[in-house]
Amino acid sequence: MPWHVLGFTSVKPRLAPRGRTNLDGTHIFNRRKGRISMRLALNDPGPALAPISPRRELGAYEALWLEKGATFKTLADRFALDAEALPSDFVPAQLAEQCAAEVMAKLKKAGVHQFGVRIHHAGDYPAKLRDARHPVELLYYRGAWEITETRCVAVVGSREASPEGIRRAERLARELVDRDFTVVSGLAKGVDSAAHRGAIARGGRTISVIGTPLGSCYPKENADLQEEIARDHLLISQVPVLRYAKQAPQHNRLFFPERNVTMSALTEGTIIVEAGDTSGTLTQARAALHQGRKLFILDNCFQRTDITWPARFEAEGAVRVKTPDDIWSALG
């Protein structure tokens, strides 16, 4: 059975009969039924519009990433020229279908049999993602998408974290959970992993925004943690499956700082536990300030004499955290 959409509409003027709405509120690829279903909140008083095919949009978006020189910036610039454009507006249907089939085959081979996509202009794509400098048009995910609708705070920092940094990340995650915040991080070694584990151990919610496709894991040692988050929480990827598979590993490293921008956009604020002057964490710091999000920097970062970034970001509006109350009072 081909993929199809139940009551999933676009803001583009493609008039068609209104379809049914999937009642379980999900949008996943189901291996057994061979389809994707998507939720639509039926609160639009306007005319019914033509449904969007997630398979075609997925394939078209992947095709755009295979074009020479494609980056998040070049794609964002293209979509900025037409505020209502969908990926399929730029890609022939046959090529989109071919790319979609390749993606499905690769994810299935990697053991990913259930996943969802979120497409700009359709369903539950979060409007807050448009605050990114180069917003993404499509996200892959596994897990409970509705977690994105909760209050979220990111906890990030160095991969080579100190023992005290690990303890701080875990403690912050526990305190965020106690205040009913969702802990967001990037599943990297060090601070990220500690934040995720701290939230899970406390019985809270966590979201991981990874720098690989859903079917890959980096670092490999976090494979079990990634699967646990996908099963019980929420795992998000903006990384194009085919481009990632076709290019050299050194080029794929560029996807990691880009996911930090999306991670910031999903949250109310970012807490930096510790980081060096060249850490990818600073990409998220810059993004948070650009997006109008809160940026918190733990006081221990300011006490280091080998780095200069904390004072620089404080001058730009970051909050220096001397006690946890500095975080809670700013978040409200």
Image: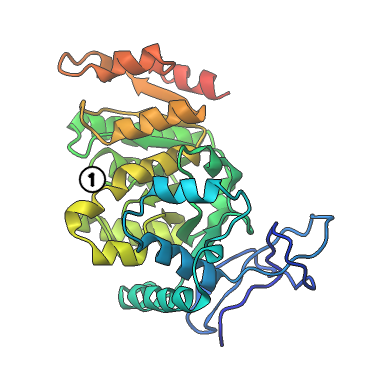
Q: Nearer the viewer, residue 215 or 292?
A: 292
Q: Nearer the viewer, residue 44 or 318?
A: 44
What percent of the width, then of the height, locates residue 147?
54, 50
Q: Nearer the viewer, residue 233 or 312?
A: 312
Q: Residue furthest bottom?
A: 1
Way the structure is coloured: rainbow
Q: Quadrant of the C terminus?
A: top right
Count every numbered label the image shows and give the total. 1
Q: Quadrant of the N terminus?
A: bottom right
What percent of the width, then of the height, locates residue 65?
38, 60
Q: Residue at x 25, y 55 (%)?
A: 222
Question: From the viewer's perspective, is residue 20 above or below residue 132?
Answer: below
Question: Is residue 102 left or right of 251 when viewed as pictured?
Answer: right
SS category of the residue bearing label 1: loop
Q: Quadrant of residue 62?
A: bottom left
Q: Residue at x 17, y 52 (%)?
A: 250
Task: Confirm whether residue 214 shows in the render.
Answer: no
According to the picture, the residue beneath numbered tag 1 turns out to be: 189
Task: Confirm whether residue 306 shows in the render.
Answer: yes
Neighbor class of circle 1 (other Cα within 10 Å; few <14, some 14-19, many 20+) is some
Q: Nearer the viewer, residue 163 or 281?
A: 281
Q: Residue at x 45, y 42 (%)?
A: 134
Q: Callout 1, which amino acid?
A: Lys
Question: From the viewer's perspective, is residue 312 above or below residue 257?
Answer: above
Q: Residue at x 37, y 35 (%)?
A: 155
Question: Is residue 138 left or right of 109 when viewed as pictured?
Answer: right
Q: Residue furthest left?
A: 306
Question: From the viewer's perspective, is residue 50 above or below residue 219?
Answer: below
What percent of the width, then of the height, locates residue 123?
64, 59
What percent of the width, then of the height, locates residue 166?
25, 35
Question: From the viewer's perspective, is residue 69 above or below residue 182?
Answer: below
